[in-house]
Amino acid sequence: MNGFAWSAFAANLAWAAAAALAVMLVTFAVAVRAGLHRIVDIAWGVGFTAVAAVSLVASAGHGDPARRVLVTALTAVWGLRLAVHIARRSRGHGEDPRYEAMLAKAPGSRNLYALRMVYLLQGALVWLVSLPVQAAQYVSGPPSFLAWAGVAVWTVGLCFEAVGDAQLARFKADPAHRGRIMDRGLWAWTRHPNYFGDFCVWWGLFLLACDAPQSAAVSVVSPVVMSLLLVRGSGKRLLERHMAGRPGYAEYVARTSGFFPRPPRRR
């Protein structure tokens, strides 16, 4: 519980910021060349994986080796799965309507505006949200029951994300479902199984950093910020605003939980 390596952790913060920035700048160069800024969504998961890998290397000689490898592996599995899923989903599509609407308001160069308002902002969020991943690398002592509870919460989250994404992809692939609302499987229990999954993943990773009070204190902002983004920011609220006018969506909202899973209400 004692002896948190503050100076080494401070250096880690700088290395993590450099890793997140590098991923976003490379992604920006690729996106400009391709003429598609939606590519940045793929970089979201890659950025977290890069930060975890850099933190694992930077924390050598500090913290518990098992915890360091565990938190890095969990972050990489989540981040790379998400990146691959978004890459597959985006294949063959044009610009994301969200970015098209944002860039239409750009004062001057659209690309430079995107760099400031999308890439650098997302890079900063990657650095901030990844604080538990960074801090957990410097926690001494083997993972406690609390840390393993975090792994269990992370597992629930990954399952909700992966299963929910797969169910939605199969639903959309059937031409008979064109224009219909997905309300089956996990989507019958929550309107946002993928966002709920993200919520669990980051609270689970936070618990892995909670065996030291110093680590918990510096990283609690991460799951709080992620929760706000998912529920009040660019996640649930923005998507539901986009979906509101679709036929049958109001009925779906009336019978299905908005975030935390529960059995659907009677029709």
Image (cartoon, rainbow, N blue to C red):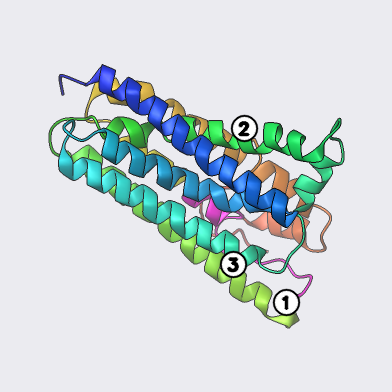
Closest to the observer: 100 or 61? Answer: 61
Residue shown at the point (36%, 22%) measured from the top left:
218
Tally of marks = 3
Question: Label for residue 177?
Answer: 1
Q: For mark 3, what is the residue?
A: 88
Question: For the magenta stretch, what is the residue range?
Answer: 177-198
* 215 vs 230: above or below: above
The answer to whether 234 appears left or right of 43 in the picture is: right
Where does the image place residue 262, in percent across and percent down from the top left?
51, 54
Q: Earlier in the sequence, mark 2 or mark 3?
A: 3
Where does the image place residue 137, in percent across and percent down from the top left?
26, 35
The answer to whether 178 appears left or right of 88 in the picture is: right
Residue shown at the point (59%, 62%) measured from the top left:
87
Residue shown at the point (54%, 55%) measured from the top left:
194
Q: For mark 2, what is the residue?
A: 121
Q: Earlier in the sequence, mark 2 or mark 1?
A: 2
Distance from label 2 to label 3 (Cα)? Answer: 24 Å
Pair 3/1: label in front: 3
Residue 255 part of the magenta segment:
no
Pair 2/1: label in front: 2
Residue 195 part of the magenta segment:
yes
**Image quarter hosting the C terminus:** bottom right
**Image quarter hosting the N terminus:** top left
Q: What is the three-letter code of the residue carrying label 3?
A: Arg
